[in-house]
Image (cartoon, helix red, strand yellow):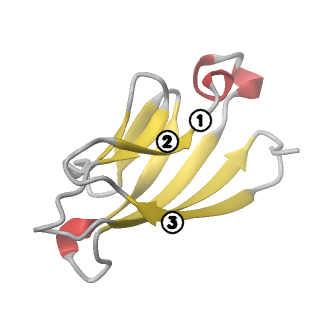
């Protein structure tokens, strides 16, 4: 296994629109097995103190999975392998943050 790499991405979404916060290279999701990456993520949508504005889980083989068993309706991995959020300012605010730990392969 390769070295881990941690990345924190924070930003502001556009209300009611799916906003890409991180594009994951295609080869890391569907390429040769030795080129695929595994990510652990922790995501915050709107406000970290809202139970509905927090999620954590994994991304592997083109699939995003939540540790809770169900992805929240504001977070997804789209067909292009981009991590996206869609926030409604009246329920969450528009701030977002995701912490990604890339477990393998080597990040160099």
Name the secondary structure under disc 2.
Answer: strand
Q: Is residue 75 left or right of residue 29?
A: left
- Would you place residue 44 above or below residue 30 in this image? below
Residue 14 x/y as whole percent: 30, 52
Q: Which residue in the rendered view is the most extreme toward the front?
A: 14
Whether label 2 touches label 1, CB < 8 Å: yes
- Would you place residue 95 above or below residue 84 in this image? below
Q: Identify which residue, 46 or 71, lies in the foreground.
A: 46
Residue neighbourhood size for the residue with mark 2, other residues' Cα within 10 Å, grouped as few (<14), some (14–19), many (≥20): many
Whether label 3 touches label 1, CB < 8 Å: no
Residue neighbourhood size for the residue with mark 3, other residues' Cα within 10 Å, grouped as few (<14), some (14–19), many (≥20): few
Distance between the alpha carbons at the discs numbered 2 and 3: 19 Å
Q: Which residue in the rendered view is the most extreme toward the left?
A: 90
Name which residue lies at 49% across and 41% down: 59
The residue to which callout 1 is attached is: 24
Q: Quadrant of residue 97?
A: bottom left
Distance between the alpha carbons at the discs numbered 3 and 1: 16 Å
Name which residue lies at 73% across and 43% down: 104
Whether label 2 touches label 3, CB < 8 Å: no
The residue to which callout 3 is attached is: 10
- Earlier residue among tags 2 and 1: 1
Name which residue lies at 83% across and 53% down: 3
């Amino acid at each position: 296994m390769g070295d881990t790499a941690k990345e924190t991405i924070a930003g502001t979404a556009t209300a009611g629109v799916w906003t890409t916060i991180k594009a994951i290279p295609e080869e890391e999701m569907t390429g040769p097995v030795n080129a695929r990456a595994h990510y652990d993520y922790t995501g915050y949508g709107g406000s970290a103190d809202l139970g509905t504005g927090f999620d954590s889980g994994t991304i592997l083989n083109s699939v995003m999975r939540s540790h809770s068993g169900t992805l929240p309706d504001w977070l997804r991995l789209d067909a292009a392998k981009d991590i996206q959020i869609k926030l409604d300012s009246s329920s969450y605010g528009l701030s977002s943050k995701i912490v990604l730990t890339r477990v393998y392969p080597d990040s160099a």
